[in-house]
Amino acid sequence: MAASLLAKGTVTLHRIPRITDVSVMWSLLEALGARIRYEGDNTVTIDASNVASYRAPYALVRKLAASFDVVGALLGRFGRAEVPLPGGCVLGTRATDMHEQAFVALGCDVHNAHGYLIAHSSSPRLTGAAIEFRMPSVGATKNAMLAAALADGTTTLKNVAMEPEVVDLADFLVAMGARISGQGSDTIVVEGVAELHGVEYEIIPDRIVAGTLLVAGAVTRGDVTVTHCRPAQLGALVDKLVECGVVTMTGDDWIRAKAGGITGGTDILTAPYPGFPTDLQPQMVGFLCTCPGTSVVEESIFNARFSYVNELARMGADVKVTMESNAAVIKGPKRLSGAPVEAPDIRAGAGLVVAGLAAAGETEIIGLEYIDRGYERLEELLSELGGQVQRSSGVTPLVEPSGFFETSEYPRVSATG
């Protein structure tokens, strides 16, 4: 959606989920001057021809870390951007230094003032450059590609993120007329072009939603098949489920996980793709609480991702976090029991729902507004699989973005094991 700011012409995106993060980005683009409308259940058209502002409002950016993606798009379009420092879930330090490194290399003057990152170039077009990141960063890679797409000359990005979502963004830019190669490897080359055009494009399936459903099947010792996904993108998760005794089968666009005979736990280290995704870590911890033996899950991406562990302890889980190594030691199997718990972020919320499916009695999860940021009607998906899950307050996200925010003060979802 942010990349659509670079197009001269209308962009049509298919497979847009009805989640609140989409609503925030929708409102942010409208605030900048874009015209957006739904064309069916999951299709959105974006016309950014009237965008004239390069300053993003704090009230929207603070709700969504991905809103920082508009910096690269605005720099590519105007050679200038003024965007508040990113918000979203509190998962630990969200440094912007690698983003700024890329912008400076492309010819921008960059500084922070009054909570805003302000970047501008003396020329309307940025200048291609060689940039090597100190570590793979999804956000910095995306922003660098967006800024370089319309730059004058060639930009070479090294040590970039290889996540499928980065590849999909590159493919989307190419469909709009950009010249990008190397996506999916650790080096991306962007040859700047004079302009990008509108396009109709289908977004890749959400691997984290697919993975969450597979883990939900495993924690309940069920038999779940997820279709319309890309199995190769979930290899790290499937490998770990197999280590625990889950029987898996895959096809071209489906994965089946049959969890009737769990034999033990496993050790996990989250890592950039193709490693184990940090966004599936809380769900797996919930599952591992029910597995025999001791499991160790080390988090290498975010330094505050284990904030949900105390909530699992309220459900009877035996989980201890070692701050020195940022790892959780899980001892099982534990028969979890339902309890009122609170979701501190999107994936932790999903992890608590997963745990609630296996817990005896009813689990009430406060913080449905977090879950709605990353999952479209998660309770309906799980109910279709046989889970007893219901939305006990709050509202289902509506069609228009404004409706996403009309929720009660403490929205909840309940899961019964």
Image (cartoon, grey):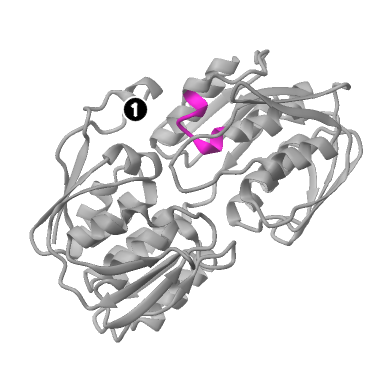
Q: Quarter of the image for the C terminus: give it.
A: bottom left
Q: Quarter of the image for the N terminus: give it.
A: top right
Residue drawn where x is 47% and y is 52% of the image? 206
Residue 23 point in image, percent of width and height: 43, 29
The three-letter code of the residue at mark 1 reads: Phe
Residue drawn where x is 79% and y is 47% of the image? 180
Residue 100 point in image, percent of width and height: 73, 38
Mark 1, secondary structure of its residue:
helix
Q: Residue furthest bottom?
A: 263
Residue 144 point in image, percent of width and height: 74, 41
Q: Which residues are magenta?
A: 60-67
Q: Which residue is mark 1?
A: 404
Q: Give above or below for 368 relative to 251.
A: above
Residue drawn where x is 59% and y is 63% of the image? 273
Residue 405 point in image, percent of width and height: 33, 25
Q: Say how many tags the image has.
A: 1
Mark yes or no: residue 281 visible. Answer: yes
Mark yes or no: residue 246 visible. Answer: no
Is 322 left, or right, of 103 in this rendering?
A: left
* Chief secondary structure of the magenta portion: helix
Residue drawn where x is 61% and y is 21% of the image? 114
Q: Is residue 22 magenta?
A: no
Is 221 left, or right, of 165 in this rendering?
A: left
